[in-house]
Image (cartoon, rainbow, N blue to C red):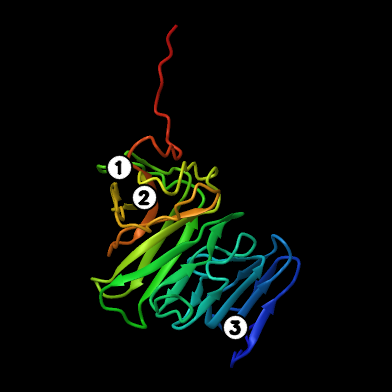
């Protein structure tokens, strides 16, 4: 576990049907890493792991945390992009620099989720100075953020889920668009993805702000179980979630009080 591992251009596969752990007291670098485990089986890291070429998520889950994080280096990608319902990272993922497989070199579809909930996040490059040292970390949470105060024109935000996208390094004027995915319209309490009432909200430290994208093509336009919503460009990062400017998309809301009379 503490020997010297030189990845060269090789592939390391974790294929066990039971839980597995990548041990050792130092971080490990992989060229290609494949996770093809039994259903609901996990691979966890005792330290950070870096992939320099390709992360292949075939089946099973990877468990990470802030100290034991999975890092995709400059020019590294994931396959399938964003993972799948049966294979994603249950914890944070860090992306550094460019991706060769995405439509734009500085975009990345994070293969993240929590528990059995797959919660992809797509980070789209918009404008600003970019560098191969730019780094972003994303994590999905299958619970509400806990603070639900909103600024106009927001009416309320989701209390079921949120995404944390943090900029670790990059120029101050680096703008991105954020695309939030839900694989279950019922679980997320969303009425329709093509409803202009449903957009993306960003937590500014004290309240939720609207970062609506008014252009066409900003949503999947679907009322099927799976769909997505894209924000406008932003240079502010941290928590994001679904928001509604009215009761059109119920989302989950907290009940403060009610009064009943005959």
Residue indicated by mark 2: 199
Residue indicated by mark 3: 32
Which badge, 1 or 3, comes first in the chain's sequence?
A: 3
58 left or right, relative to 166: right
Which badge, 2 or 3, comes first in the chain's sequence?
A: 3
Rate crowding at label 2 as few (under 14), some (14 to 19) or many (20 or more) other CA atoms within 10 Å.
many
Residue indicated by mark 1: 154
Q: Residue furthest top?
A: 262
The percent position of residue 227, horizontal first and vertical second, equals 49, 53
The percent position of residue 52, horizontal first and vertical second, equals 51, 84
Q: Residue at x 49, y 75 (%)?
A: 71
Q: Nearer the viewer, mark 1 or mark 2?
A: 2
Spatial CA span between label 1 and label 2 = 10 Å
Q: Quadrant of residue 195?
A: top left
Q: Residue at x 28, y 62 (%)?
A: 234
Task: Say which element carries label 2.
Answer: strand
């Amino acid at each position: 576990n503490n020997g010297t591992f030189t990845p060269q251009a090789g592939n390391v596969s974790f294929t066990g049907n039971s839980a597995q752990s990548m041990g050792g007291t130092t971080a490990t670098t992989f060229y290609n890493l494949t996770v093809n485990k039994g259903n609901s089986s996990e691979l966890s890291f005792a330290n950070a792991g870096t992939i320099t070429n390709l992360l292949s998520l075939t089946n099973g889950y990877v468990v990470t945390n802030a100290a034991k994080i999975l890092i995709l280096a400059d020019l590294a990608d994931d396959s399938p992009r964003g993972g799948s319902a049966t294979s994603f990272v249950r914890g944070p993922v860090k992306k550094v620099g460019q991706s060769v497989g995405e439509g734009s070199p500085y975009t990345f579809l994070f293969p993240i989720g929590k528990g059995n909930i797959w919660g992809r996040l797509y980070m789209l490059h918009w404008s600003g100075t970019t560098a191969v040292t730019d780094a972003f970390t994303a994590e999905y949470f299958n619970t509400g953020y806990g603070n639900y105060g909103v600024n106009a024109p927001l009416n309320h935000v989701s209390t079921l889920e949120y995404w944390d996208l943090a900029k670790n390094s990059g120029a101050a004027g680096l703008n991105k668009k954020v695309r939030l995915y839900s694989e279950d319209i019922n679980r997320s309490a969303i009425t329709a993805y093509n409803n202009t009432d449903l957009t993306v909200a960003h937590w500014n430290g004290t309240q939720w702000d609207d970062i609506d994208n008014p252009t066409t093509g900003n949503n999947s336009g679907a009322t099927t179980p799976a769909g997505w919503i894209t924000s406008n460009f932003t240079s502010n990062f941290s928590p994001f979630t679904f928001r509604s400017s009215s009761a059109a998309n119920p989302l989950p809301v907290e009940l403060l009080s009610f009064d009943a009379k005959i």
